[in-house]
Structures are given as structure tokens and as C-alpha cells.
Amino acid sequence: MPADCIPAAVAALRVVAEIEAVAAAGPGRFDVTLSFREDILSEGAGALMNVLHGNVSLKRGVRLVGFAPTPGVLAGFAGPRFGVAGLRALLGVPRRPLTATAVKPLGLDARALARLAGGYARGGLDIVKDDHGLIDPPAARFEERVARCQEAVTAANAATGGRTLYAPMIAGPLGRMEARFAFARAQGVRVAMVAPMLSGLDVVGALAARHDMALIAHPSFAGAALGEGAAGIAPEILLGTLFRMIGADVSIFPNAGGRFAFGAAECGAIAAALGAPLGGLRPALPSPAGGMTLERVGDMVAAFGRDTLLLIGGALMRHAPEPERGAAAFRAAVEAADALIP
Amino acid sequence: MPADCIPAAVAALRVVAEIEAVAAAGPGRFDVTLSFREDILSEGAGALMNVLHGNVSLKRGVRLVGFAPTPGVLAGFAGPRFGVAGLRALLGVPRRPLTATAVKPLGLDARALARLAGGYARGGLDIVKDDHGLIDPPAARFEERVARCQEAVTAANAATGGRTLYAPMIAGPLGRMEARFAFARAQGVRVAMVAPMLSGLDVVGALAARHDMALIAHPSFAGAALGEGAAGIAPEILLGTLFRMIGADVSIFPNAGGRFAFGAAECGAIAAALGAPLGGLRPALPSPAGGMTLERVGDMVAAFGRDTLLLIGGALMRHAPEPERGAAAFRAAVEAADALIP
């Protein structure tokens, strides 16, 4: 809006950002620090993103590299329902790094996926989740898949005395997503995987809260945080601070050295943002993933520490065709790495 | 997943993409055409995006530049409820280019915004919408703002015999968004502005359908379509085809030569995607915007034709402090441009 058309009373409110600092940050690049009045914000993550990276996402050469929400802003967000301590309590694992894998590939039917889930649970993994492509495919419809996988994991727990949790992927059109949360909860599911960028920043946390579920956030379609040049959003803001604010108990991100594009510094920053003080919000767990292998467990534990959910998928199958053996090897690698932490 | 760990029965299904063609597209660049089985898709836009630009959004050097949905995929999407013809019927404007503006700035109270809305309606604009930052700010809470603006536009229509529509910005946490659609509809509102990337691709169309509302899609946080180098999504796919599939009757995009980064070819491609045959889906209206002025009306009508919703905001205020005068000048410019179309 032309500045000279702003009514004086509105101009006096200073609803536009204040420029706090401008610092050279390289050839043709500047770090600019802006502050906003709290009361220009409406409730929710969509409204917040509208200010942080709304229209400006459509300009070249502007990247969101930092975000310091005020206590007033944070008070509007529930954050993780369980957080690190709550998830550890659900799992009965007070201290060591946590383990997760995915049942896949797309194309297996519900019975085959449940066999894998049960095997991984018997092998001692903490969380067995759906691959994020398993939303409601014809070969493994949501309800049958979730009922069978949950049943298989429950049976495995009964046999081993373990407390493995099965985490279905929940997405889909709004009404279906609501029904899926309700169905999963009725089956005894306590953790859901969601993709906030696919399903809506303000949707996933609301549905998890209605059903008292923990959330694992998947980064699908979060390319805004790709870190490509001078556009987009720093990964630790989107996959760290913001996903935590909207309720992620765990945030999965593509770890350095895997199939994706993030570097070690970016991954460390995501993990730090998930654990750093953030108003009264609980800390969330980082989950480095994306082509990780058993051989990298030691490095990952060294890099991310105990409060980490290590996620290894295909490499467990590569290790052995029986899911129990892959899971047991993963669990052993984590315990060995844990023993090396002072 | 390691290829040699895929069970033979699943491999035979060919759930992975088939490579249809690879063509050189410049130094170090290739156009790769992939096809997917329809039945790997679950219902909804989130699931579709998961396949089109899900995990791959986290890789460097991969850009989605084309998308040809099958009839089977399109059958799962309702598309625009009103479309070009339906919106023209609501507005009583069968032929000429359509006009819209926004009430702003953030900081005005509901009464002041309603005064603007009424003035623009008296001046003969077709649609008066909220600025997209007006979600539920303390100075102009949703319910009071929508009630007053709708009332002001209705009164203006009664005085002039016009059929201006007021389009509130609807966003917010899930429960609130549902309540806002219901409230607006109860006030007689027939068009809502939504930001699919802020609120969720599968959310906005579902809510519009529940309340029989037309949708104006705003591109806030759609930076994935920025068009920056070799990442992201071509703008015509996200703001054209996909926004239309999820129910946008109008898609606003930053026009070339304005405040944002799109070029003329990209804007033309968006408009083309909104109007092109797409299964049985209705065509949607392009709405070039972002720093547009009265002087550019002729060029925009020449570029986009009659089936366009021209959106000019601040420049109307620059033209004259009284909204009626800015609106009348805009309307006159559109009629003059329309007269030049053969």
C-alpha cells in the first residue's frame, strides 16, 4: 500500500515491521533483523507463516534465516503434547537413543505390512511407523492396515514384554483425516505420523490434540526449507521451531550424507531448535533419516546425543530379510553407541 | 528401499515411476518424463503432492515442470464449484473482465474497513476482498469485520442495483476456520479468500464445499512455485492446475512487472492452466495482482483476455482518497480496455 495513503492513525500503530538492524553478510547479501508488533498476528500457525514467509516467499533473494517468537506468540501454541519425556515414558525408555523404522514398500498388502511391523517390534525397535507414502493405497487401505499393524505390534509386545509403538501415517482430505485419527486412537494407537506441509500447519496439531496422540512430523513437501541459495526458509525454522510449535513430538529430517540435500550444520541446527528453550513448550526429538544405515548409528548418536529417534528404513532389510534380525542389529548398534556416551 | 529387497510380487506391480523419456534441456539439465500408476495414489491433494513433490522437494536440482493428471486422478477432485461461468452468474457480469480490490491496511478497525468496502461497491467493483493479512487481528476481529463489510456491500448494492460480492479472508486453526466459513455463509457471503499453502491443500476446498462458497486462492507461502532455478514447482502447476483441482474459482498470482518475481511467460502459463481443459473440471479465473496500477489495466486485459479478475489494491487509494472514485476509475479503465477486444 502506498505509504502516503496510510491513514495517520494507522501509521501511528506501526503495524509494519521495524528494521532493527542491517548487517553485511557477504557480497550483495545482508542480514536484516525485523521486529513485528505481536498484535498484528491472528491465531495459529497459518497466520504466523503469513507474516514470516507469506507474500515474501514469492520474491527472489529473500530468505528467512532466524525467528525469535515472543512469549506472547508462543503462548498461542501448544507445542508437543508429549515431548521428549512424555514419549520416553510411553515407550518405557528413560535414557538411550530411540529407534524407529518404517514398514514398506508401497505395494505390500496390510497383512504383509503387519508381519513386518510385528517382526520389527519383536526385534526390539521403539517405534514402527508406516512409510509416508502409505496413506490409503488400494493394496493396504488405512483401516485394515492400521488395525492389523497395531494388532501385530500389540501381540509382539505381549510376547516380549516390550513397549513398541506403531505409528500410522495419517493424511487425506479433511473429513477422512479426522476419521483416521479417531479410528487409529480407537485401535489403541498413541503416535501418528503426519506431514504438516501436505495436510496443513494448523490441522495436524488440532487433530492430535482432539485424540491425545503424539505426533511424528514428516518433511514431505517441505522444500521451502531446502536451503537453496537466497530463498525459502532455514530448515531449523520450518522443521525445527515451527513444527515443534504446531505440536510435533518428533521431527524427521533428511540427515547429512544420506539421499537428500541437507548438510551437517543444518541438521545440527534443526536438532538444536527442537530442544532449545522455547517459552513453556516441551522439547521435541530430532529424527535424522533418509538413507541412513546401521554403520552410521555411532556417528548419529555422537552428533545428536541420546535424545534422538534414529530412523533407519531400507537398510534393515538389506541387513537381513527377517525384520527381527534387522531390528536386533539396529538395537544392538544403538546400545553400543549409547555406551560410548560419557 | 534397496531394489534387491523389494519382494518379487511387489516389484512386478511397478509401483515406482516408469521413465518415459529423457531429453537434454541445456548444460547439465534434463527434462525427464515419468509416469506413475494411478492406483499408488491415495485420495486428496496432499497425497497427490506427496507423489509429485514430496520427498523430492528436499533434493537439490529437481524441479517439477509439468503435470498431466489422468482422468482417473482428476475424477477424485471436485475443482471449482462455480468456475468462470458460475462466478459471472453470481456477479451478473456475462462478458467483460472482472474487477477486484482489497480493503486494507491492517490496523484499520472493522468500521473503517466496512466504509471502504461499501465505497468500492458503490463505485462498481465486482469483488471487494479482505487483504490477506486480515485474518482475525485485534483491531478488526473476523466476525465483526465480516458482518460489517457484508452489510456495507449489501447496502451499496441496494443503492446502486449492483451485485458486488464481499470476500472475507478465511484462515486460522482448524476449528476456527470451520466456524468462520459457517459464520460468513450465515451473513450471506458467497465468496471466500483462502491461502491453500497456509491452511492446507485438502482443507480449503472441503470447507468451501460444505458451505457452498466460491473460493479465491491467495498465493501466500507458495514460494515452492517461485521459479528459482532448478528446484521447486513451476508456478502454473501449483497456482494453476493444483489450486484449480482443489477448488479455486479464482487464483491470484503476482503479475509480471509488479512487486514480485514472476515473468510474463510464467503468468501466461498460470492463466492457461486455469482455463485449459482438465477432465470435467470447470475453468477458473486468473487474477494477476501484486502492485498493479490503473495504467496497466489495458495491458492486463490484452494479456489475459476477458476471463480475468483484475486485482488492484493500493493504487486505487493513490488515485483518490474516496474509494468510490478509485473504483469508478478502475471500472472505466476495464470497460475501455474491454471495448478494444475484437
Image (cartoon, coloured by chain):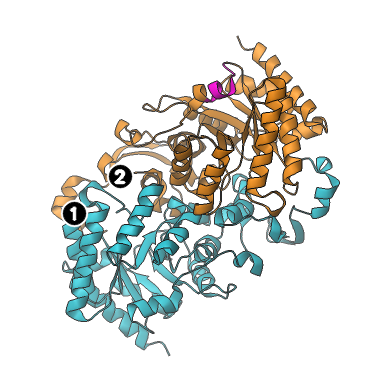
Chain colours: A orange, B cyan
Dominant secondary structure of the magenta stretch?
helix
User: Circle 2 marks a residue in which chain?
Assistant: A
Q: Quadrant of residue B340?
A: bottom left
Q: Closer to the camera, A287 or B39? A: B39
Amino acid type for the residue under numbered disc 2: Leu
- With respect to residue B291, does B141 lie above or below? above
**Outermost residue, bottom direction?**
B342
Q: Marks 1 and 2: CB-CB under 8 Å? A: no
Residue on which disc 2 sits: A41
Instruction: Give the image location of residue B163, x and y in percent.
Output: 28, 77
Magenta residues (range): A87-94
Have a look at marks 1 and 2 and say if they share a chain.
no
Residue A193: numbered disc = none
| Residue B39 visible, this angle | yes
Q: Residue at x 67, y 46 (%)?
A: A144
The residue identified by callout 1 is B109
Left or right: residue B171 compared with residue A89: left
**Residue A89 in magenta stretch:** yes
Residue closest to the eye, A281 or A262 = A281
**Quarter of the figure with the C terminus of chain A:** top right
Numbered disc total: 2
Q: Residue furthest top?
A: A342
Q: Is residue B100 above or below residue A323?
A: below
Q: Secondary structure at mark 2?
A: loop
Percent position (x, y) of residue B268?
50, 71
Q: Which of the 4 quarters of the picture holds residue A68?
A: top left
Residue B93 vs residue B143: left or right? right
